Amino acid sequence: MAERYSTFQPHGTAWLLQRVTGAFLVLVLAFHFFLLHFVHHPADIEFAGTQARMSQVSYFATMWLFLVTATFHGVNGVYAALINQGLTGTRKRVVRWVLILAGAALIVQGTRTALVMAGV
């Protein structure tokens, strides 16, 4: 029988965060999809409407948390997949820092974009 193999330590911090962010993403993605595909038809979405939604603190906070959790979930998942494929040593350290910097850059740029959309 095949053995279970994972880079995550069962019930460790990375394991828990991957699951918590995954659950959060499912909920927020459902909200996002419902709002922008059923409440507001995609053809009717304009920048002014985006600004109006993003100017609401609760919506802005939700979308910003969506950005941060999606970035963490994706970066952490890619890193775990690469380790599962046998990445070790110097390459592992380089990949970890490249992913951390790319994730940080994505969050910074996403935050800047969200602030512009909120009219800040």
Image (cartoon, rainbow, N blue to C red):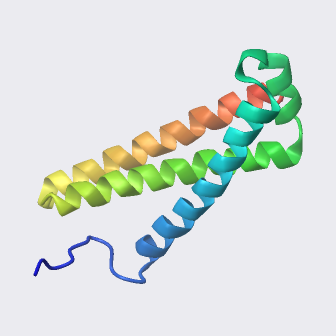
Residue drawn at x 57%, y 54% as measured from the top left: 69
92 versus 38 height, above or below:
below
Q: Give the quarter of the figure containing the N terminus.
A: bottom left
Q: State whether residue 119 appears in this view.
A: no
Q: Choose top left, top right, bottom left or bottom right for residue 38.
A: top right
- Quadrant that contains the C terminus: top right
Outermost residue, front side = 38
- Classify residue 14 as left or right of residue 95: right
| Residue shown at 58% from the left, 38% from the top | 108
- Pick the residue in front: 120 or 11: 11
Vertical position of residue 25 compared to residue 104: above or below: below
Give the quarter of the image for residue 12: bottom left
Residue 98, image x, y percentages? 32, 44
Query: In this picture, is 5 found above or below 58?
Result: below
In the image, residue 55 sits, relative to residue 119, either above or below, namely below
Q: Nearer the viewer, residue 52 or 32?
A: 32
- Quadrant of residue 90 within the rendered picture: bottom left
| Rendering coords of residue 18 (x, y %) | 46, 65
